[in-house]
Image (cartoon, rainbow, N blue to C red):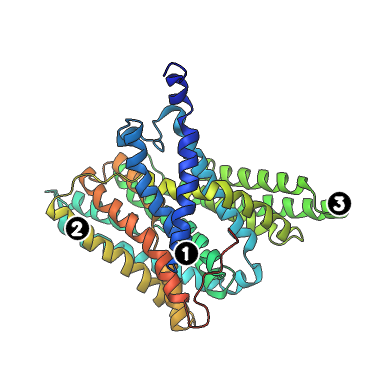
Amino acid sequence: MDFINFESLTEYRYLLVLAAILITTKLLGLISRRVQMPQVVGALVAGVLLGPVVNAIFGLSTAEGFFSSTAGSDQIFGMLSELGVIVLMFGAGLETDVNEMKKCGKASFVIALIGVLVPLFMGAGVSWFFIDNGESQVKLLKAIFIGVVLTATSVSITVETLKELGKLNTHAGSAILGAAIIDDILGIVALTIITSFGDKSVNIVLVLIKIVLFFIFALLLGFGMYMLYKWMNKSTKRNSRRHVIIAFSYCLISAFAAEVFFGVADITGAYIAGLVLSMTNRKRYLENRFATLSYMFLSPIFFASIGLTIQLPSLTSSLLTFAVILTLVAIASKLFGCAFGAKICGYNAKDSFRIGAGMISRGEVALIIAQKGKACGLMDERLLGPLVIVVVITTIAAPIMLKMLYSNKNNKKLKTAKV
């Protein structure tokens, strides 16, 4: 076996893992489609199955796995995963009908507000009985923090599912996207308020000012890009690669500025960038180019990474009970809370529950919030296990419920791209 350079095997193992991710996500995605489920469900399951297998093959512990931020050169997977969700949300912005979004503006705010308050109070109420802490004030803060974790919405899963179903650019789809963006902002405010009690260095007023400044920045940058594209349309008679390069650069700059300078999620900046370019006459051209990049490479890595990062510590009977109850609360609070908000805004019953189902997925957003709580002492490490279970189940349940709610006798097959 001298002809095998084992040092190179370690250095270049990411190539094999990448190939395994692409093949496995596609294979399980096709199986999901065969059983009338969105392909994203298969991709998520692929990540869950690949994590232990890949780590076992290369002798890695869960803590130093391929998607761990402490895995040295393997941080590339974490970056590709983040890039995947950025491109996914940028594509969602490109496909959004701005006129339809305007119609859903007020409704989206109401849906988001109720979709934050209901999980917050229900999550805090349930968590109170499972937190071991003698001081009632500290116990209350920790319970409220878990409620804040449940306010999170990972709309990227919903976006991919709605794309497969051909329902992204509908009245309900637009409401989901609008509500998810507002939900993100309200979640940041709630997180800032609760963490300020555990970390006195957090300035609530400063955070709110930065959020307002972000939207001013996004408006000015978006106007500049829109005018640039109008000028480019006059000088370029046909579709050109320069449009793709400029659009992608705009997306990345917007995402970077949102996260680093203003403390807003990078996917919010990416989505707004796509929304701006959706108003140009290069919309379809850009959609096709970025859909190829996302479908072929980045999206499978992102969806698989959710499963690959999952760590399930040992659970006691008490924690397992907490996990089951918290999962039911997580699903019910978003489903019925957002559905109620949609109903009072004039949506019919079916669309209301579609909107509620689209807001269920917590995804990586909830895990990120939980880690921040752990860092400031508001999240007990032993409760991370139940939260991971909530994330896994809600992430898989959302696309399944959307498929069920959108299914009808005349449309039994998913509207998916050619394989």
Quick check: can you spot residue 244?
A: yes
User: What residue is rendered at 49% in x and 39% in y?
Assistant: 18
Report the residue marked by disc 2: 322
- Residue 172 x, y percent position in the rendering: 52, 73
- Residue 226 x, y percent position in the rendering: 74, 55
Q: Amino acid at mark 2?
A: Phe
Q: Relative to 99, is 208 on the left or the right?
A: left
User: What residue is rendered at 40% in x and 67% in y?
Assistant: 400
Q: Residue 157 versus residue 155: which sits nearer the camera?
A: 157
Neighbour class for label 2 at 10 Å: few (<14), some, many (≥20)?
A: many
Q: Residue 351 versus residue 7: which sits nearer the camera?
A: 7
Neighbour class for label 3 at 10 Å: few (<14), some, many (≥20)?
A: few
Quadrant that contains the N terminus? top left
- Residue 78 x, y percent position in the rendering: 46, 39
Quadrant of the rendered structure where residue 326 is? bottom left
Please say if 186 is above or below 103.
above
Q: How far apart are labels 1 and 2 at the CA level?
A: 33 Å
Q: SS class of the residue under badge 1? A: helix
Q: Amino acid at mark 3?
A: Thr
What number is the disc on residue 33? 1
Report the residue marked by disc 3: 236
Q: How many discs appear?
A: 3
